Image: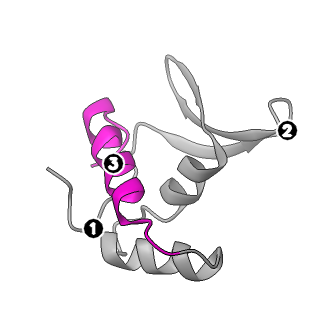
């Protein structure tokens, strides 16, 4: 199930890694390297925005349409992996 206001889990920290030249999720046991799309979605998972607001913001920022499925899929997968509360 996708949360209405997805929020990055407190066990993870999203940060840009210069050495990796990419965004990563850091956690006590390691690191998850993210592609650009995943990073843009997770940056907006603050517990304040709804999924629809995240989609609208991304579609506006990148001048594209039809991102709902991609955003929902990543948030759902992030929930399974424990990234999203």
Which circle's residue, 3 or 2, is located before the other in the chain? 2
- In the rendering, which numbered label is found on residue 22? none
- Mark 1 highlights which residue? 5
Tell me the CA gap for discs 1 and 2: 30 Å
Q: On the rendered structure, is 42 left or right of 33?
A: left
Which circle's residue, 1 or 2, is located before the other in the chain? 1
Measuring 20% from the left and 55% from the top, which residue is drawn there?
2
Tell me the CA gap for discs 3 and 1: 15 Å
Q: On the rendered structure, is 2 left or right of 44?
A: left
- In the rendering, which numbered label is found on residue 73? 3
Please name the colour scheme applied to the rendered image: one colour
- Mark 2 highlights which residue? 18
Residue 5, picture quadrant: bottom left
Taking the magenta stretch, the answer to whether it contains residue 31 is no
Residue 63, picture quadrant: bottom right
Measuring 75% from the left and 40% from the top, which residue is drawn there?
22
Question: Foreground residue, 67 or 27?
Answer: 67
Q: Secondary structure at mark 2?
A: loop
Which circle's residue, 3 or 1, is located before the other in the chain? 1
Q: Main secondary structure of the magenta part?
A: helix
């Amino acid at each position: 199930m996708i949360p209405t206001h997805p929020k990055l889990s407190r066990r993870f920290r999203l940060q840009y890694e210069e050495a990796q030249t990419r965004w990563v999720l850091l956690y006590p046991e390691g690191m998850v390297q993210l592609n650009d799309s995943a990073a843009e979605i997770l940056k907006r998972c603050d517990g304040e925005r709804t999924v629809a607001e995240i989609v609208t913001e991304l579609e506006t920022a990148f001048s594209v349409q039809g991102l709902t499925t991609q955003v929902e899929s990543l948030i759902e997968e992030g929930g399974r992996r424990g990234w999203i509360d």
